[in-house]
Amino acid sequence: MSLNRSEQLVFDHIQSHAEERQHWAEKVRKTLAGVMDEYAAAARLDGELWRYYQERSAVVATLRESARREGAQRISMKNLAEHLIRLWAAPRPRKPRSPGEALP
């Protein structure tokens, strides 16, 4: 999975701070529990990660520099959201295929 520069900075920040990592791991699990599929969860987390990036860029030097460089335009955090889901979500059971159903 390829993260953009801002996503990578947010991921590195979350990984290097145990409280942040724990907070986001729990948020990923709760978000998945409240939606039907991983796509909807990723869309919801994308927005939350963007707001987190904006908030933390006011106080974290590396994020502040990135925000200054990137400007005020919205940056997608969808790849990061999908990556966090893969890292922290419990595997969901696949529904059984009916006989003759094609493989995905």
Image (cartoon, helix red, strand yellow):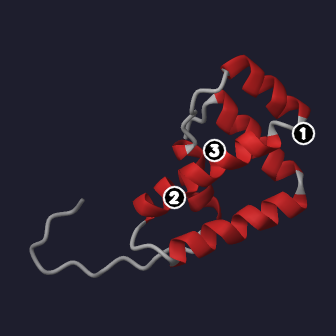
Instruction: Work out how far the residue at label 3 is from the one at label 1, CA to CA, in angstroms.
Output: 15 Å
**Residue found at the far left of this picture:** 100
Mark 3: few/some/many CA within 10 Å (<14, 14-19, 20+): some
Give left or right: position of 64 versus 102. right
Q: Earlier in the sequence, mark 1 or mark 2?
A: 2
Corner quadrant of residue 97: bottom left
Residue 16 rendering spot, x and y as whole percentages:
88, 49
- Residue 44 is labelled as 2
Element marked by disc 1: loop
Q: Relative to 17, is 96 above or below? A: below
- Residue 59 is labelled as 1
Pointer 3: what residue?
50
Q: Mark 2 belongs to which amino acid?
A: Arg
Q: Nearer the viewer, residue 77 or 103?
A: 77
Mark 1: few/some/many CA within 10 Å (<14, 14-19, 20+): few
Instruction: Work out how far the residue at label 1 is from the one at label 2, CA to CA, in angstroms.
Output: 24 Å
Q: In this rendering, does residue 36 appear at all?
A: yes
Residue 5 rendering spot, x and y as whole percentages:
67, 28
Q: Relative to 98, is 49 above or below? A: above
Q: Earlier in the sequence, mark 3 or mark 1?
A: 3
Residue 20 rendering spot, x and y as whole percentages:
83, 58
